[in-house]
Amino acid sequence: MEVQNAQHTILFECRKPISLLYVDDDPGLLEICKLFLEQSGQIHVDLLSSAQTALEKLKSCTYDAIISDYQMPGMDGITLLKTLRSQGNFIPFILFTGRGREEIVIEALNNGADFYLQKGGDPESQFAELEHKIKLVVEQRKIKTELVESRRRFTDLIDFLPDATFAIDLEGKVIAWNRAIEDLTGVVKESIVGTGNYSYALPFYGERHPILIDLMLCQNPEIERQYLHVKKKSNKIIADTHVRILNGKKDLTLWGIASPLYDTKDTIVGAIESIRDITDLKKAEEVLVESEQRYRNVVEDQTEFICRFLPDGTHVFVNEAYCRYFNREHNDIIGKRFAPRIPDEDLVLVRSHFASLTHEMPIAHIEHRILMHSGEIRWQRWSDRVIFNPDGRVVEYQSVGRDITEQKQLEESLRQTNKKLNLLNNITCHDILNQLTALLAYLELNGEKISDPEALDFLKKEIHAVNKIRTLIKFSRYYLDLGVNTPDWLNLRDVCMGAIPGREGITVTCLSGDLDIYVDPLLEKAFSTLFDNVISHGEHVTAITVSYRKDPEPGGVTITVEDNGAGIPDDEKEQIFKQGYGKHTGLGLFCLREILLITGITIRETGVWGEGARFEIRVPPGRFRDASSA
């Protein structure tokens, strides 16, 4: 008893005094009781001499506990107790009386009294016992109140969770059932809270049996086998399950997570489970998986090499064709920095190619050589796309390529054949020109001996025809060089400067010093021809300007050559590029277009008649680069 008193002394010494109401019709006992109970300073006692005045007092004041005598005039202590309980007042109540009959004790306890203490005996020990019981009953009521409040807060918290959630105690009785699970199952809280025997399984499975939440209270492999994709994470279990019918809905997939419930001493006092209907999500996942599989099948069936890689060269995807070509397994490439060996002279081109990919021009094409593991050199053509994140940082490249070695070998074979044919043609043309020169000489000599006017007219026509033949043969020799030499990177400014000499009185401005284009080496001759046409047909040309701009979509650059001459009439803008059209031979612009087309470059005239000619030369992606990156 002394130990208990010491414990309660420590427990209450930092708290405010207990407020106590003592009701008794004996004035002397009221006084002595107050003296004993208040001497520790832990209890404050108010005294009343009747039950009726106590009821009135309680309407305006609150107390932590009541001590009441049993036998009092007007209303006894048990009647006071019954009245309070009928009013919903469950204040701790101790019956302190001189009557010790058993039926009184039973009646008091049955009507909600917390303790019964009989008067008499040694006053000091009796009041010490009374003080102990007062403190004990107040502490018990406080704990009970806090427990009820804690459960209320717990229930309120669960009630506002977005996921369907319920909880059970160690006996398997439902102690919480929130609004979301009411909506999910159609079962209201009032009909299930307090029930046990696996009642919480009925809405889901139509029968009583252990479910996921029960795994928190007992390990049972049979329960786990009911679920799909069971995962254990710390003290939680996560799993999926299929439900045939739930609240009128059929064939549902539910996701659940269960964990233990602990009290303040970290003792397991129950379990809690949250449930989510993921049927639509699962269907969407299945559609996505099916779509990804179709996409993967399409990609894997391609003969082109397809890959995706990070800026540091780490590959995140390659298709089967890519692996077969390089004789590697997926695991040898995915997640690793894989790069085929590229000859040094082509490596500069490749680096420049990727450096040219921007927001404005995210796609470009390139042809280059690679060194195979066997030492063989092969050609590839790639289409590359850069992917940016919302911050504008490069996060990935996507590439589609194919082997063009046979095409390149065929082109080289044709080039060599053309060289041989050109050599033969040059010899033949040379011989023909020699004979034409001799023929013209004879015709000139013959003209000196002819006096007949009609014969002289015929002779002039013959000489004109021979001169035209000479011009055509000279052009054919010039045209035969097209496509013979391999295209190369030429600086646009250097090309312009090489075409300028000999044009006195003409100012040529070139605003394209940082642009290289991949083109036939005859481009300088072609620009010289273009300048000749501009000057000869522009009538009063004094200035020519060459500039360029980058095009946003689908990429590429446009080179502009414009003058301040007469310009080209609208009905002649396309005709000027046809063979034989024009004031002279009509071969200059025709030949220029053919030179450009060798590498996919196009030309058109877009100027305004009367304001000067304007030629736009469009270079496709992969056929230009910044000279500074070369």
Image (cartoon, rainbow, N blue to C red):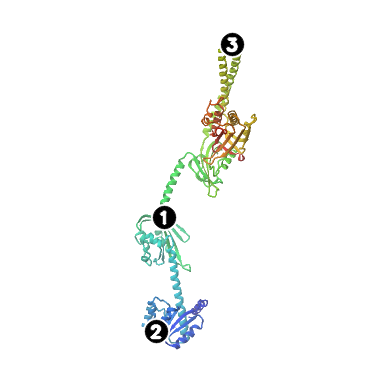
**Residue linked to disc 3:** 451
Counting the numbered discs, the total is 3
Q: Earlier in the sequence, mark 2 or mark 1?
A: 2
Which numbered disc covers residue 70? 2
Q: Residues within 10 Å of mark 1 (few under 14, many from 20)?
A: some
Which numbered disc covers residue 278? 1
Figure quadrant of residue 349: top right
Q: Is residue 392 left or right of residue 99?
A: right
Is 416 drawn above or below residue 17 in the view shown?
above
Q: What amino acid type should be assigned to the residue bearing mark 2? A: Tyr
Q: CA distance from mark 1 to mark 3?
A: 109 Å
Residue 371 visible in the shown view: no
Q: CA distance from mark 2 to mark 3?
A: 169 Å
Of tags 2 and 3, the one toward the viewer is 3
Q: CA distance from mark 2 to mark 1?
A: 64 Å
Q: Secondary structure at mark 3?
A: loop
